[in-house]
Image (tube, grey):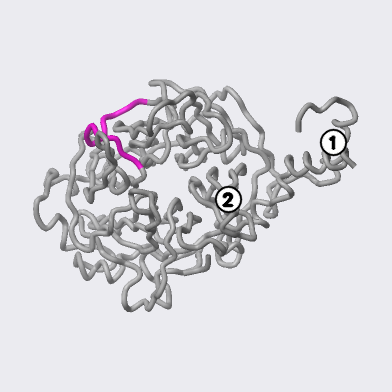
Amino acid sequence: KSLRTLVLVLLCHFVRCQKDPLKDFCRKFSHRTAVMNNKIYIDGGYVNWAPLSAESENVTNEWLVYGDFEIDNSGFPQQFVLPSKLPPNVAGGSLWADEINNIFYAFGGYFTSETPKPFETWAFDGNQRTWSNIITQGESMAYAAHGMSAVSPDTGISYYLGGYQDALTTAEWSGPRRYISRMTTFNMVTREYSTLSGPDLSGRGEGSMHFIPASNAGMLIYYGGVEQYPGSNETKGDIWIFDLDLQRWYMQKATGDVPEPRARFCSGVTWADDKSSYNIYLLGGIDPDFQTVGFGDVYVLTLPSFIWIKWWPRPEHNVDATFPHHSLTCDVINGTQMIVMGGHFTNITSECDVPVVYGQHGLDLGVINDKKVPWVLFRYDNPPYRVPELVVNVIGGTARGNANATRPKNNMTYDEYLFEKSYSVPQRYPTVPWQPSTTSIVGTNDTNSGSLPETSTLVGAVIGSIVGSVILGVAGYY
């Protein structure tokens, strides 16, 4: 009897009591995503299994999952589980997508199930379906969590601003959590790290940053989250601009329906055909003190007028509840729609997040669907982005562009010609694959119902191990 009990304990340990990351899905949060070549990859963070209760455990997500835009599952991309994973399990990290080479790089995060390890750079090759621990050049790096991340696709350079370090990111850490002020850059062509100065000497994190194809070489737009001063954490409503050509930071105050201060929200950006407006869609978040105040609303920050617009819910939407949640992801697909995935729901302890589609929700950024509603199912062939009427009413122009409001109403702090400069970056082509230091062949046998071994096979392996050796220890659509 004791042998049978031991076998069952070990079996439950090795196969997680047969929990399946898709079949048993209830919620996911603090994960990271990347979009490459008609797939969305989901890695890290935590999952909750169904059924859910206030006592449910936050389980480390040990699987790499992807959704295929060309395979429908109840109105959203069908997800599949890749069979193996080598990188450390982390939460609050980022994935940098190099679509030209069909590779994404994993950066940052805090360790969820083991003691922090020395820094490594892991890359996943979508063509070869392999994880590789790659050799990099340049400056030495360390793990940091919940920084602001963005990628300049034409130059192949990725950016990570701020983030924090503590005992979950760094072994033998002592003292309180410390936010970082600098910005890390990673050249995905040369695989070289370097650092740049942040907006100032204050540490910062938990906000959002986006690349936009404006000015000569592009810009980074950063806002929200936590800014750490000596002895305190504060948040401001400032919008920061980093000109990639001039390597210079600017700060601009926004006007309009300025949202409440928040952290760990998600957002995505798209723009008009003529780039006369760049529109950032913000969703969710939690108050910067990380108490119980959560958000489930949607705002649009339109540039270069720097005006906030409350997008959802509005009186005409007749919405009673917004389901506040944070630590979610937003991914803009083809500039026209946004997949919102997962999140920690602060006020709901017993309901799963639409498990049939694995916590995916869809925003039609241009509201060009027949019903003229913001929340819709995913469409692989969704029409091109059009500036929604609600935004046009504020900045002028038409659905295709020609915005009249092309600068802040007052107190413009950046170069007045910054947004008027023509974006001109040479076309980039695929590069020769790197030489990895470690490689794991993932294989081709993906599954949409998990990738766990058969019970009978594993039982035999466990029993054989015991006999042959001494064992010394044993939410709904919007």
Task: Please tell me the numbered disc located at residue 47.
Answer: 2
- Residue 36: percent from left, percent from top: 50, 46
Quick one: 126 or 66, which is closer to the camera?
66
Task: Please tell me the numbered disc located at residue 413.
Answer: none
Residue drawn at (49%, 45%) of the image: 32
Please state if 191 lies on the left or on the right of 213 as rendered.
right
Residue drawn at (38%, 52%) of the image: 291
Would you say residue 196 sits in the magenta stretch?
yes
Q: Which residue has dot 1 on it?
A: 461
Please state if 295 lies on the left or on the right of 13 as rendered.
left
Q: From the image, which quarter does the N terminus lie in?
A: top right
Distance Cα–Cα, label 1 vs label 2:
28 Å
Query: Which residues, given as a range, are shown in magenta?
Result: 194-205
- Residue 12: percent from left, percent from top: 75, 44
Q: Quadrant of residue 295?
A: bottom left
The residue type indicated by label 1 comes to: Ala
**Within-10-Å neighbours for mark 2: few <14, some 14–19, many 20+:** many
Q: Quadrant of residue 126?
A: top right
Looking at the image, can residue 97 be seen? no
Quick one: 476 or 38, which is closer to the camera?
476
